[in-house]
Each structure stands twice: as structure tokens, then as C-alpha cells.
Image (cartoon, rainbow, N blue to C red):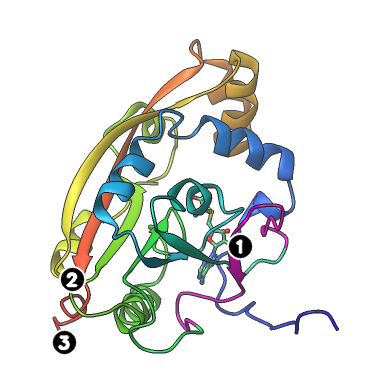
Amino acid sequence: MGEPEHDFSDHVIPFYGGVDRRMFAIERRAMDRDGRVVEFLDGALPRARVLDVGAGDGHTAELLSRGGRTVVAMEPDGRMIDRSKDLTWVRGVAQDIPFRDDAFAGAYATWAFFLSGTPDADIEVGVREMDRVVVSGGPLIIIDNAGGDEFTALADHPIAGDGARWERLGFESHIIDTSFRFDTLEEARELIAFYFGEATAAGLDSREIGFRVFAHVGRSGRPGTEG
Ligand SMILES: C[S@@+](CC[C@H](N)C(=O)[O-])C[C@H]1O[C@@H](n2cnc3c(N)ncnc32)[C@H](O)[C@@H]1O
């Protein structure tokens, strides 16, 4: 018997990665190539059982599965799931996490679900769910674009996250300075054309693009208490 098919379609933010695996591989290889985000998460998450919300292909979950930490990779889009990675995979959405209360010592999401453009109501439900499944005092960490950098300047519409929202929810925001560093200028232009159009990509003259990232850190039991 195969695994049951759930219909999460009303709750899922569409993402291209499951359809265009090659382009996603370029993105994941170049984004935060020096591992600054993983380094931050590794320092902030306990060496115990933690949840990755919107794990994509499990890139970050795999890197964080070390030193006594196990990461459960939750992802709604079956096409994103890479079962060749030695992870525990679960299908699920942030708004309805399929685990009991206090099942994890911490939880995080990297550029998944809690993005600018996601309706406030959905974000609040997702935060409450993360809060519920993490033991009191355990870290909840949201990684998102911070803006004010070379990368977000390439877009003709806002693609930075909303720092004030996370402050209101009781999170403390940190900035991580990282970059997209591509293997070649051609790869850089290919991904930037895909995101922002050919004209923007044609103007690129470096295979490295500066990228500032937010790490919003909360504690279970605190977020969502604004009423
Ligand atoms: C930009 S990708 C990031 C993937 C991965 N976290 C990473 O850093 O490579 C966004 C991911 O969020 C997932 N996603 C979309 N809607 C979601 C939801 N409601 N709850 C959890 N994850 C969701 C998508 O399927 C996709 O895999």
C-alpha cells in the first residue's frame, strides 16, 4: 500500500521547485553557499528532536541532522520530497501540523510558508501550530528575506519579509549576512532571469549576489500572545 494522498491544496503556497527540479537545484546550491543560515540554526536549535516546517527537498534538515539532533522534515508537496535523504518525512502544512502537543524540542522554517504575501491570518495559525507542537521554552525560528541587499534590489516588487510582524508576535530578529554564489555567471543569469526576467539577468556581472536574511527567534509559549 502506498501512503495515503492528502489534499492540502487549499493550504499550500505554490512553489516551483517540485516541477522544475533542475532550477531548484541551482537555487539550493547557490543560496547561502557558505552555510551561514545552517550555522545560525545549528547554534540556536537543541540537539534533540526538531521539526522543519516546509522542508522542501530536505537540504537544511539533512545538514542539521547531527550531534544528537534528529530533524523531522514536514513538507506538503510530494514532488519536493527527496527520499534519498536519510530523514523522517511527513506530509503536512504549517496551519495543521500532524503531531501531538509538545512533540518537539524546537521548530524552524526556512523560506517556507511564513513569507511576505502570506495572509496574516494563515501566519498566525501556523505560528500557533508551531507553538503547540514545541515544548514550552523551545525555540521557534523563521528564516526569511531581510531586504536592503543586492538580491532583493533585483526584484521590481517587494520580496522582503515583514520584520515588524515578528516583533509584534514576540520574536527577536537577527540579521544573517550571506549570499547567493553560483558556479558560473551563466547559472546566476539563468536563475535571476527565471525569478526577475531576462532584462534584469542581463545586467548581472558577478556570480555572487549579496543576500541579507532574517532569523526571527521566538520561544514556545510566547508567540501569538498579542490576542
Ligand atoms: C521556498 S521553498 C523552501 C524549501 C526549504 N525550506 C528550503 O529552504 O530549501 C518553500 C516550501 O514551502 C512549502 N510550503 C508551501 N506551503 C506550505 C504550507 N502551508 N506549510 C508548510 N510548507 C509549505 C513548499 O511546498 C516549498 O517546499
Q: Which residues are magenta?
A: 79-97
- Give the residue displayed 41% in from the left and 61% down from the top: 117
Q: Relative to residue 142, is residue 64 drawn left or right?
A: right
**Label number found at residue 70:** none
Q: Is residue 139 left or right of residue 3?
A: left
Q: Amino acid at mark 2?
A: Leu
Q: Quadrant of the N terminus?
A: bottom right
Image x and y of residue 136, in percent:
20, 80
| Mark with earlier residue (2, 3) | 2
Q: Which residue is mark 3?
A: 227
Q: Residue at x 64, y 77 (%)?
A: 9
Residue 69 on image: x %, y %: 40, 59
Quadrant in which residue 78 is drawn: bottom right
Is 78 left or right of 225, judged from the image as shown? right
Residue of label 2:
169
Residue density around tag 2, few if under 14, some if 14–19, many if 20 or more, within 10 Å: some
Q: CA distance from mark 3 to mark 1?
A: 29 Å
